[in-house]
């Protein structure tokens, strides 16, 4: 844009000098007419150039999760589509997950974030992991993305159920993280507390390394299946998933509206010969409440108009749908996202 104006200014100056040099050969009326015509032509050229100049891309940073988790891998793909289809240049960064992403938007470090739907609710309402710091209302929802399975992984053949975790060393995620509260809910539904296990507060990558090294007996990992960290573990070790079903799943759903039953199909991981039943929350894309309506509309459109192509690049893309995107949200949508959904015949609460 600066180059365009600089060029236009140069043209005006050159034409003005040319007009002055021919002053002695031109009558006053003719000179005035020539100068006026020149200015009009130059103005039209500048206007046309400015109009045709492409709009500069909006720059945003997206907080995701650990580099071994689904958030980061999937977020990288979504970020590319936002850049190519929505003119939003997204930098995808690895973070500590849901709570960190909500807080990152609050302080201005991130414009976008992937979060668990339950943690998003905690932030919006100021409960559980946000009880000490208070509610956060600086974000809005763009879309629900996919089911995040609560996965309990172990290499200890003695562990066949949640109840078998008693007395064992178990990774339950970072303190006050989404994984932590999911683990607490699972344990509680099975009649256990954190005091009944030997809790370890580790990331996905740390958990799988600790399992391989025999430092822990089991780990909770909450992410879309297949999860890279678990896939890597199962590819080279005798690891397997422990079901979270029956009375445990029923108690969790009765206690919280975020949980639904979910089946991880046989063959999802190496050596998994049977379906594994568990519970799930929903991965959700959120955005800074102050983001422009145009940018958020374009981001939403870029995702859902290209859902089939995204699904070819990542398995979780198969779960992209307007129904999944707009259901079960306990925080308001951004007006830009709401505009896109309205075009699809779906009305959502927006602020």
Image: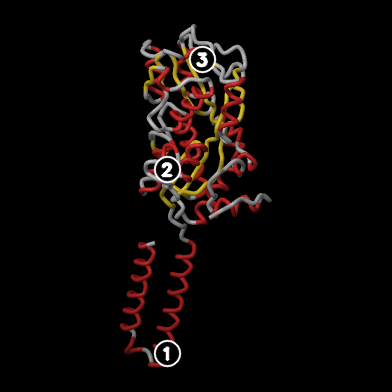
* Residue at image mark 2: 102
Residue 28, position as x, y percentages in the image: 38, 93
Whole-number angstrom distance, CA of label 1 to CA of label 2: 67 Å
Residue 39 pos. (x, y %): 42, 79
Q: Position of residue 297 (x, y in %)?
A: 55, 52
Frontmost of labels 3 and 1 is 3
Q: Is residue 106 above or below residue 162?
A: below
* Quarter location, residue 5: bottom left
Mark 3 and mark 1: span between their CA atoms?
98 Å
Near-viewer residue (74 or 216): 216
Query: Farthest residue toward the top?
Result: 157
Q: Indicate whether 64 appears above or below 262.
A: below
Q: Mark 3: which secondary structure? A: helix
The residue carrying mark 3 is 163
Nearer to me, 131 or 79: 131
Residue 84 position, x and y percent, is 50, 45
């Amino acid at each position: 844009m600066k180059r365009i104006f600089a060029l236009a200014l140069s043209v005006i100056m050159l034409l003005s000098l040319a007009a002055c040099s021919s002053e002695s050969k031109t009558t006053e009326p003719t000179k005035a007419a020539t100068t006026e015509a020149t200015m009009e032509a130059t103005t039209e050229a500048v206007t046309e150039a400015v109009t045709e100049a492409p709009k500069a891309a909006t720059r945003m940073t997206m907080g995701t999760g650990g580099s071994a988790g689904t958030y980061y891998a999937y977020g990288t793909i979504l970020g590319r589509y936002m850049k190519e289809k929505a003119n939003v240049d997204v930098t995808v960064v690895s973070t500590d997950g849901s709570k960190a992403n909500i807080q990152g938007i609050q302080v201005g470090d991130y414009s976008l974030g992937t979060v668990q739907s339950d943690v998003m609710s905690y932030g919006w309402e100021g409960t559980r992991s946000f009880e000490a710091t208070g509610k956060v209302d600086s974000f809005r929802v763009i879309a629900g993305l996919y089911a995040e399975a609560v996965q309990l992984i172990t290499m200890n053949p003695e562990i066949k159920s949640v109840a078998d975790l008693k007395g064992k060393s178990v990774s339950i995620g970072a303190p006050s993280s989404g994984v932590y509260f999911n683990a607490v809910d699972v344990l509680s539904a099975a009649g256990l507390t954190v005091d009944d296990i030997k809790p370890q507060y580790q990331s996905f990558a740390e958990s799988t390394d600790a399992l391989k090294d025999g430092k822990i007996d089991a780990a909770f990992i909450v992410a879309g299946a297949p999860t890279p960290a678990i896939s890597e573990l199962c590819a080279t070790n005798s690891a397997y998933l422990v079901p979270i079903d029956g009375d445990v799943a029923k108690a969790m759903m009765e206690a919280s509206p975020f949980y639904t039953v979910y089946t991880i199909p046989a063959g999802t991981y190496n050596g998994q010969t049977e379906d594994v039943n568990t519970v799930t929350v929903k991965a959700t894309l959120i955005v800074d409440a102050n983001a422009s309506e145009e940018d958020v509309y374009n981001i939403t459109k870029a995702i859902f108009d290209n859902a089939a192509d995204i699904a070819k690049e990542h398995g979780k893309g198969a779960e992209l749908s307007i129904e999944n995107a707009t259901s079960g949200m306990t925080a308001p949508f951004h007006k830009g996202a709401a505009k896109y959904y309205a075009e699809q015949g779906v009305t959502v609460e927006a602020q």
